[in-house]
């Protein structure tokens, strides 16, 4: 290829690598620069190498349907969709409109695409050709970026062409992906001359010089300008376009050809340019409505501007389409859209055409677009649903309906992880909102955006003012809506705690409202605002709240936070689990990520490291494809704590640094407290006690987390010589714990007091803490208490009693995989006279430790009898990726068959559910 030998050599090298590892390449450049030509050369190389081709092309259109380009890409291989796991198969079929069902999870759709491509690639290497990325529908772009991020060992090559100037996607959807970028620039002067020699036209020396100058190294411009000059009389054929960008000059050049066509032909071309996917029969039917005969198109075919194949029309180049559409008047474009709307057999596309033809607000058209949005949402095409609702809102005459549509669009965008879009829609809707329920919905969306993406949310003062306005002149109107608004303030204060005075003001507002019926949101607001004094009253009500909120994802998440505030860890775990399951069923990824974060935290609090890692892994797979920096920071902070318990301090420090980097975009006290806790645990394990004390002191920013971390804070303070500073903190926490009556808190306070107490009093506190820990069922914290008690007993020269406590601690730490403390216990046992402690336990635990978190998660599910496809649906992976992980796990576990998994993992699984035996 002229001027592209280096780029072609790069592609040739990449193609040879695809046999062992998937590859993605994006070829970028301005219109006409030769992207398609380079990709065509690469495709020919893959054909020679035996690759199967799958292709899709983006179309510049106002009527794009969700997953349209993805369907084009996968249509030739849909016959093998039966090989996919059932949930993934159903999601993809629903997305394409082949099945009716509940709204599919977007992640399952993307996994189905990946799984189908991996299945095809297992039979034959595959090359995916994606032309004009900038015009693909947003849902297809999401699926393609998902696949590009996860190309691993499957022989799949993705070739993407994208225009870098003119009309492009908002932002770069491929930023951060593991792909090769090839930026095509203009030809050099020498290359331009060589290329111009290949154009079959006769040019004078002056014309040739002018073409070279005007084309500026653009191959398409060289060809088209040369053809234009050779067929246009006069020396100034190009002069009107000389100061325009190359793309505009090319469009003007194509328009020169179009303008010479008959009027009827030009109108047929406009219809074709207006249609998203020009089907000839629909074009002819629309043309008849405008008084045009099918033969009107013949002149455009003879001029080489369009071609017809397989019942569809295609333009010679996308610039021909954009030139024709851009040159038409508003009236002409409106007539074309109206005619296409009348003949379209696709309801959504017809609705978009009618919207494009509308020049004023029109409720009928807006209602049709709203229905189109609902159809898109049911297929999992949330970006298109949001776009349709937003356009419907702009066409809506009634302000109330307009705001309702904006609010619905904002919430769909939030749940789909399009947080920036959601925030803009909320900002547009808020000033116009009047309906009470819409106002509540908007404030809820704002709150959740602030807690997951860090966008600014309403303050507690603003929410109290809103609640008062909803109350009307007498202050008694809309009690349920006012409670919901104040509940929003309460949840906000959980994530970013306020002063006691601020919380009590909101609490007083809640108590002043007389609800018309029992309201779970009122109870949760009170529990969040004053958990210490309301624990005894509200904790017995939590099961009733769970039953009332079982179909309310947001309510279940709130119940989980309330349960955490009230120190009911089992109920918090149950609520997070219910929220995660419901979010998964409804396809709300943002909510599922948040619920998985909460459940992972509760797993960790209850001493279950492996299930905590399961949820963290799943959440991380989801969050990497969404704009949720706060959620990502929160998940990785919990991951750092788990790794600190496991003794993987290098990874813990690295992931904590990542968490803090993400949180810097939008600090939240809930997250920063978890980060400080993780940092303190790492420093304790590394015996950096001053650093541990400094880190853990910052946990105080979040009262609930501070209660949970009080014993770690005390241990760091004692080892750092800060007894005096930490004592009032412990006593303050003890007063709250006494009121709340939670066994877990009693254990932590007992342990803290034991560390601070004189020698004569320490044992009483240790034994009290152990009794409370047994009642609480928080295994790792109980084992940590036994470790500290065992260390104290050994220092008191009571080795037999020390061995008993240390032995039980060791069994729990080994079974849970808490390797950070195993070495410490072993050292204490040796000092207490134990020569060879528990070697067989450690051998099996070490085998488990060789597995990556994802391998262990998959192995545990396989041990339960699940097939690879069932596991894939469960953990959001393709079934072939599941198979790869199991293949790697078997030798690490010392087994050769799937049937041996249960026994190999039995020790780890048993350790997650057994309480240590009591001998005290």
Image (spheres, rainbow, N blue to C red):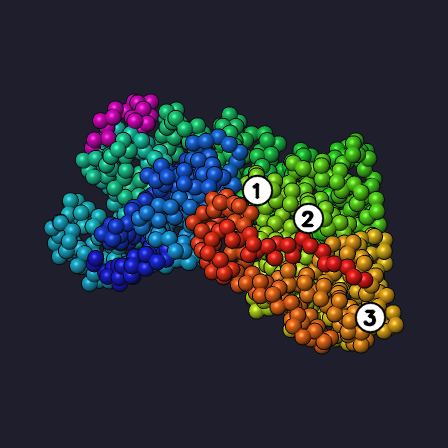
Disc 1 element:
helix
Q: Residue at x 25, y 42 (%)?
A: 316
Please state which of residues 530 and 648 is positioned toward the viewer in this rendering: 648
- Pointer 2 local density, CA inside 10 Å: few below 14, some 14–19, many at least 20: many
Left or right placement of residue 884 versus residue 620 in this view: left
Task: Give the CA distance from mark 3 to mark 1.
Answer: 46 Å
- Pointer 1 local density, CA inside 10 Å: few below 14, some 14–19, many at least 20: many
- Residue for badge 1: 584
Is 755 drawn above or below residue 852 in the view shown? below
If the image is split into quadrants, where does the C terminus sit? bottom right
- Residue for badge 3: 756
Residue 856 percent across, percent down from the top left: 54, 56
Q: Main secondary structure of the magenta part?
A: helix
- Pointer 3 local density, CA inside 10 Å: few below 14, some 14–19, many at least 20: many
Q: Residue at x 41, y 56 (%)?
A: 152
Disc 2 element:
helix
Is 891 drawn above or below residue 727 in the view shown? above
Indicate whether residue 861 is drawn in magenta: no
Of tags 1 and 2, the one toward the viewer is 2
Q: Which residues are magenta?
A: 281-299
Residue 489 percent across, percent down from the top left: 72, 47
Left or right placement of residue 634 versus residue 25 in this view: right
Disc 3 element:
helix
Tell me the number on the disc at residue 573. Answer: 2
If the image is split into quadrants, where does the N terminus sit? bottom left
């Amino acid at each position: 290829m002229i001027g592209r030998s280096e780029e072609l050599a790069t592609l040739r090298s990449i193609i040879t690598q695809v046999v062992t590892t998937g590859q993605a390449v994006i070829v970028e450049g301005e219109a006409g620069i030769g992207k398609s030509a380079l990709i065509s050369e690469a495709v020919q190389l893959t054909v020679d190498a035996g690759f199967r081709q799958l292709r899709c092309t983006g179309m510049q259109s106002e009527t794009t349907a969700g997953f349209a380009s993805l369907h084009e890409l996968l249509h030739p291989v849909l016959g093998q969709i039966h090989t996919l796991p059932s949930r993934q198969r159903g999601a993809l079929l629903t997305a394409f409109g082949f099945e009716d069902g509940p709204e599919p999870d977007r992640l399952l759709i993307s996994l189905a695409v990946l799984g189908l491509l991996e299945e095809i690639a297992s039979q034959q290497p595959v090359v995916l050709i994606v032309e004009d990325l900038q015009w693909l529908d947003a849902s297809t772009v999401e699926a393609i970026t998902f696949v590009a991020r996860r190309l691993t060992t499957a022989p799949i090559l993705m070739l993407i062409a994208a225009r870098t100037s003119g009309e492009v996607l908002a932002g770069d959807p491929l930023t951060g992906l593991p792909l090769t970028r090839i930026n095509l620039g203009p030809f050099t002067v020498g290359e331009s001359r060589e290329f111009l020699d290949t154009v079959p036209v006769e040019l004078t020396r002056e014309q040739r010089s002018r073409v070279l100058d005007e084309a500026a190294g653009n191959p398409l411009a060289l060809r088209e300008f040369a053809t234009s000059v050779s067929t246009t009389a006069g020396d100034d054929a190009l002069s009107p376009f000389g100061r325009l960008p190359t793309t505009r000059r090319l469009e003007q050049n194509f328009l020169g050809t179009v303008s010479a066509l008959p009027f009827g032909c030009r109108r047929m071309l406009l219809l074709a340019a207006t249609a998203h996917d020009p089907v000839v029969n629909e074009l002819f039917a629309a043309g008849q409505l405008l008084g045009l005969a099918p033969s009107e198109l013949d002149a455009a075919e003879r001029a080489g501007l369009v071609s017809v194949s397989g019942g569809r029309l295609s333009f010679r180049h996308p610039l021909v389409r954009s030139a024709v559409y851009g040159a038409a008047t508003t009236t002409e474009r409106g007539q074309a859209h109206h005619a296409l709307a009348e003949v379209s057999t696709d309801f959504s596309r017809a609705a978009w055409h009618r919207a494009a033809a509308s020049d004023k607000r029109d409720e009928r058209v807006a209602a049709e677009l709203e229905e189109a949005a609902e159809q898109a949402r049911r297929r999992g095409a949330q970006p298109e649903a949001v776009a349709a609702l937003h356009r419907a809102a702009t066409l809506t005459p009634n302000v109330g309906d307009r705001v309702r549509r904006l609010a619905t669009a904002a919430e769909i965008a939030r749940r789909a992880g399009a947080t920036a879009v959601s925030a803009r829609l909320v900002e547009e809707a808020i000033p116009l909102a009047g309906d009470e329920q819409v106002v509540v919905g908007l404030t809820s969306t704002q709150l959740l955006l602030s807690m997951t993406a860090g966008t600014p949310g309403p303050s507690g003062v603003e929410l109290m003012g809103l609640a008062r306005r909803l109350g009307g002149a007498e202050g008694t109107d809309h009690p349920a809506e006012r409670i919901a608004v104040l509940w929003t303030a309460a949840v906000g204060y959980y994530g970013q705690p306020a002063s006691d005075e601020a919380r009590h003001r909101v609490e007083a507002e809640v108590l002043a409202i007389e609800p018309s019926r029992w309201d779970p949101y009122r109870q949760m607001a009170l529990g969040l605002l004053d958990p210490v004094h309301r624990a005894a009253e509200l904790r017995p009500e939590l099961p009733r709240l769970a039953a009332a909120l079982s179909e309310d994802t947001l309510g279940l998440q709130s119940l989980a936070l309330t349960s955490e505030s009230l120190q009911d860890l089992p109920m918090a775990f149950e609520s997070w689990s219910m929220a995660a399951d419901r979010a998964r069923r409804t396809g709300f990824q943002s909510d599922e990520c948040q619920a998985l974060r909460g459940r992972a935290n509760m797993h960790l609090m209850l001493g279950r490291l492996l299930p905590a890692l399961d949820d963290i892994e799943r959440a991380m797979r989801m969050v990497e494809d969404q704009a949720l920096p706060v959620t990502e920071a929160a998940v990785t902070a919990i991951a750092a704590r788990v790794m600190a318990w496991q003794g993987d301090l290098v990874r813990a420090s690295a992931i904590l640094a990542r968490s803090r980097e993400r949180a810097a975009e939008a600090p939240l006290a809930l997250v920063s407290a978890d980060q400080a806790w993780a940092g303190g645990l790492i420093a304790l394990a590394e015996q950096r006690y001053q650093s541990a004390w400094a880190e853990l002191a910052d946990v105080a920013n979040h009262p609930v987390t501070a209660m949970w971390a009080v014993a770690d804070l005390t241990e760091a303070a004692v080892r750092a010589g800060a007894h005096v500073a930490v004592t009032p903190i412990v006593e303050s926490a003890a007063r709250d714990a006494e009121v709340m009556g939670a066994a877990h808190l009693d254990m932590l306070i007992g342990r803290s007091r034991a560390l601070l107490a004189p020698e004569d009093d320490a044992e009483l506190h240790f034994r009290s803490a152990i009794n409370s820990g047994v009642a609480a069922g928080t295994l790792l914290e109980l084992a940590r208490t036994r470790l500290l008690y065992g260390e104290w007993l050994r220092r008191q020269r009571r080795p037999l009693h020390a061995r008993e406590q240390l032995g039980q601690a060791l069994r729990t730490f080994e079974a849970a995989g808490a390797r950070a403390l195993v070495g410490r216990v072993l050292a204490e046992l040796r000092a207490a006279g134990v020569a060879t402690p528990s070697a067989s336990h450690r051998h099996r635990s070490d085998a488990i430790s060789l597995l990556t978190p994802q391998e262990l998660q998959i192995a545990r599910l396989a041990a339960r009898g699940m097939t690879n496809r069932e596991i894939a649906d469960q953990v959001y992976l393709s079934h072939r990726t599941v198979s790869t992980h199991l293949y790697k796990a078997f030798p690490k576990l010392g087994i050769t068959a799937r049937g041996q998994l249960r026994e190999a993992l039995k020790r780890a699984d048993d350790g997650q559910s057994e309480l240590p035996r009591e001998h005290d």
